[in-house]
Each structure stands twice: as C-alpha cells, then as structure tokens.
Image (cartoon, rainbow, N blue to C red):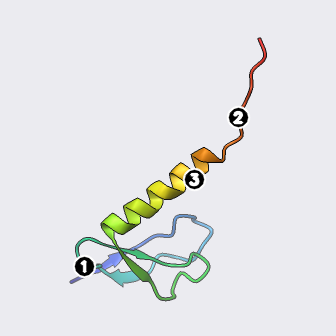
Amino acid sequence: MPPRRTRPCDPRHARPSAQPDPPPGVIPVRDSKAPHGPTLAFRRQAWAAFAEDLKADRQAHQPKIHQTP
C-alpha cells in the first residue's frame, strides 16, 4: 500500500509524516505528544462505541443551566 500523509488534529503538534494505510476497518490512534511514536489499532466499531460512550458521559455530567424568567 502506498504511504498516506497524516496530519495531527492540532497544528501546533509535529509536522505530518508518511504512514502506511491501516488495514480496512482499523482506526490507528497515536499519542499527540509523541506523533512519531507507535499507534494502537482499534476496530472501527470499537472506536465508534468508545467515542459514543465519551459523548454520553460528557452530556451526563454537564451542569444544568437554570434560566430565570
């Protein structure tokens, strides 16, 4: 497979580097503080479930804003 150019989410982090394409259905995750370090590979379904759990947890813990009339 040809290398793929990747870019960190935050432009203040390291420059993009050439990485091989992950296998189909796999999400590679890297520590943003070590952009050239190893990756953890997650199945797409597992990563989606993890992201949904984070979203649900964040919504459950948001402070309630009370508006006065």
Q: Amino acid at mark 3?
A: Asp
Regarding mark 2 in the picture, which secondary structure is present there? loop
Which of the two residues, 6 or 38, is positioned nearer the viewer here? 38
Residue at 25%, 79% (x, y): give it. 23
Vertical placement of residue 62 versus 67, above or below? below
N-term mark: 2 or 3: 3
> Marks 2 and 1, Cα distance to the nearest angstrom?
42 Å
N-term mark: 3 or 1: 1
Q: Which residue is mark 3?
A: 57
Regarding mark 3 in the picture, which secondary structure is present there? helix
Q: Position of residue 17 (x, y in %)?
A: 44, 81
N-term mark: 2 or 1: 1
Which of the two residues, 1 or 15, is positioned nearer the viewer here? 1
Q: Amino acid at mark 1?
A: Pro
Q: Position of residue 67 (x, y in %)?
A: 74, 21
Q: Which residue is mark 1?
A: 23
> Marks 2 and 3, Cα distance to the nearest angstrom?
14 Å
Q: Position of residue 27 (x, y in %)?
A: 36, 72
Residue at 36%, 82% (x, y): give it. 19
The answer to whether residue 21 is left or right of residue 9 is: left
Give the label, 2 or 1, closer to the camera. Answer: 2
Quarter of the rendering containing residue 46: bottom left
Which of the two residues, 14 or 58, is positioned nearer the viewer here? 58
Q: Which mark is residue 64?
A: 2
